[in-house]
Image: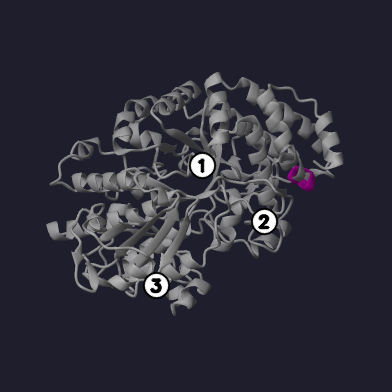
Amino acid sequence: MRAHVRAEFEAADVAGDDAFAVRFERFFTELRDPLVALYGDDPRFADAWRRLLRAIAETAAGRSRELRMLDHEREITPDWLQREHAVGYVTYVDRFAGTLAGVRERLPYLRELGVTYLHLMPLLAARPAPNDGGYAVVDYGAVDPALGSLDDLRALADDLRASGMALCVDLVLNHVAAEHPWARDPAFLRTFPDRDGPDAYERTLPDVFPDTAPGSFTWSDEHERWVWTTFNAYQWDLDYTNPDVFVAMAEAMLGLARVGVDVLRLDAAPFLWKRLGTNCQNQPEVHELLQAFRAAMRIAAPAVAFKAEAIVAPQDLVPYLGTGKHEGKECDLAYHNVLMVLLWSALASGRVGLMTSTLLAMPPVPPGAGWLTYVRCHDDIGWAITPEDAARVGEDAYLHRRFLADWYAGDFPGSFARGARFQPDPRTGEARTSGTCASLAGLESAPDDGARKLAIRRVLLLYAIAFAHGGLPLIYMGDELGLRNDTAYLEDPHKADDNRWMHRPAMDWTAAERRHDAATVEGQLWAGLRRLIEARRATRAIHVQGTVQPLWTGNDHVFGLGRAQAGERLLVLGNFTADPQPVGLGVLHDHGFQLDEAAGAVDGRPVEAHQDFVVLAPYQHLWLVG
């Protein structure tokens, strides 16, 4: 520590056991520096700082012996989320099993699949519908009563640990419901007396929901001021220029740590800091806030990890894993939105040049951090194809985005997809996309058994790349069974104007009973994902800290991905078309791999080898271990 920081540390007067004392000293600077940079001149900071340190110490002291032992274990195994055995599952509590108690009863299903990480979508107490799917929170210290209680969440966390699974829950950072107690205090909000401020900001602010919630400000009769509302009129943005806001949110985080949550998904993280003349995303102060939150957690409950919900451009994405000006770490994991978009792009176009080129240009992940790789999630797909990435392979970004929106809405000639446009822009014709993985991949439109087999192969190909890329792969609920779009949301007036609910179906437990029948769609998808999970576990090269290298295969329809870690190497080839595609054996040999029959085991189809090349069957993926 610097001398003046050492003096502050020694004056902090924070007591705890020996392990806590070591952590407090180790991360004190990482906690202090970003907060002093943000709030050092604010007269409210001194009191806020004392309250923060007290909350950290009380959380550490209040953790059970089991959780304190977990803290020690994960301190010496910081890669616990990054290993090749890690596989995640994402679901809504009510859509999956009704209640938290119901989820506990369904854990054998997740154990059978091979899950080690369970992300439960928003479950904290929210305002009555509409509530943005639970992201309009009224109480960070309570569970939605329809789902259970905080004790039920604690019991589920205990059961998951006993089953070798980690629990992830959402924490909404940027905003609260208009009914939240914090929203009664104008000092906690970004407000304006007239339209001058909002109008100035909106010159550069994009609309998140242009159809249903245009603009970023809402008039409040209660405060008689305009309130910043980035997402919906009932979700009021917090003012992080106030240190009391930071401490209040830190206390919410620490409360979930005491319950036994393993991972916090930090929702809407890029929006925390506002700056006139910008899009008010990814500002430098956002990273200082996240570094301070992370340092507080590393002192109080180091077993708890952070993952960033930052769906932003590649150059803005990696900093959420910790490359800010301060030394502190930010998040352990971040969604690899770029990979997800590129997978669907390659599937629609049948060409892998854009995916290969863009992934090659991605900045490296900082040591100790990793990706969440996924095929689908609860949200829409935003076609984030940048002009720079498209230009490298001779594409027009705008036209490609238009093509993808048309293709996955089922409007492009020859499309197998049955999705829907989300928030279309009438000025440009661009749109985001809703739809389940199965429906986007062609299961819903398949007229016969041959078309169904191709759709199943598409789903498994996308998951094969997500599983092999390196990171924590996530299975979105129902993808393992091929659940199609659900139109029941149209009958609910609170959901009917949000077609994202089409890809948030209720779990079909009758379909799940068919998962062991190889003659069914469910049986083929379940078996294919089980093969991928077993292949991951047997392949050390997939560890997050290994190297990842997209490869040119000499065939614009076949993607190549190389990985290396701990003396082991992996090469995955994936055919993104419905036609057989050749790859020269010289490509394999140049990278030190030899073709054998085992390369087809994960896909489940034989290897078609010739003297000078191998032919990949429609949507086939080959795994070569060296």
Name which quarter of the figure residue 399 lies in: bottom left
Secondary element type, mark 3: helix
Task: Give the extent of the magenta segment.
Answer: 34-38
Secondary element type, mark 2: loop
Q: Badge 1: how crowded within 10 Å, few (<14), some, or many (20+)?
A: some
x and y percentages locating residue 421 in the rendered image: 38, 61
Q: Amino acid at mark 1?
A: Asp
Q: Closer to the camera: disc 3 or disc 2?
A: 3
Report the side of 506 relative to 139 (left or right): left
Residue at the location (32% across, 67% down)?
A: 348
Find residue 353 and name its label: 3
Report the side of 605 relative to 490 (left or right): left
Secondary element type, mark 1: loop
Residue at the location (72% across, 42% down)?
A: 30
Q: Badge 3: how crowded within 10 Å, few (<14), some, or many (20+)?
A: many
What secondary structure do most residues of the magenta stretch adopt?
Answer: helix
Q: Closer to the camera: disc 1 or disc 3?
A: 1
| Residue 329 is a magenta residue | no
In contact (CB < 8 Å): disc 2 and disc 1: no
x and y percentages locating residue 65 in the rendered image: 55, 19
Provide the residue designation for mark 1: 79
In whole angstroms, how far apart are the C-alphas of marks 2 and 1? Answer: 28 Å
Residue at the location (30% across, 57% down)?
A: 623
Provide the residue designation for mark 2: 283
Q: Earlier in the sequence, mark 2 or mark 1?
A: 1
Q: Amino acid at mark 3?
A: Gly
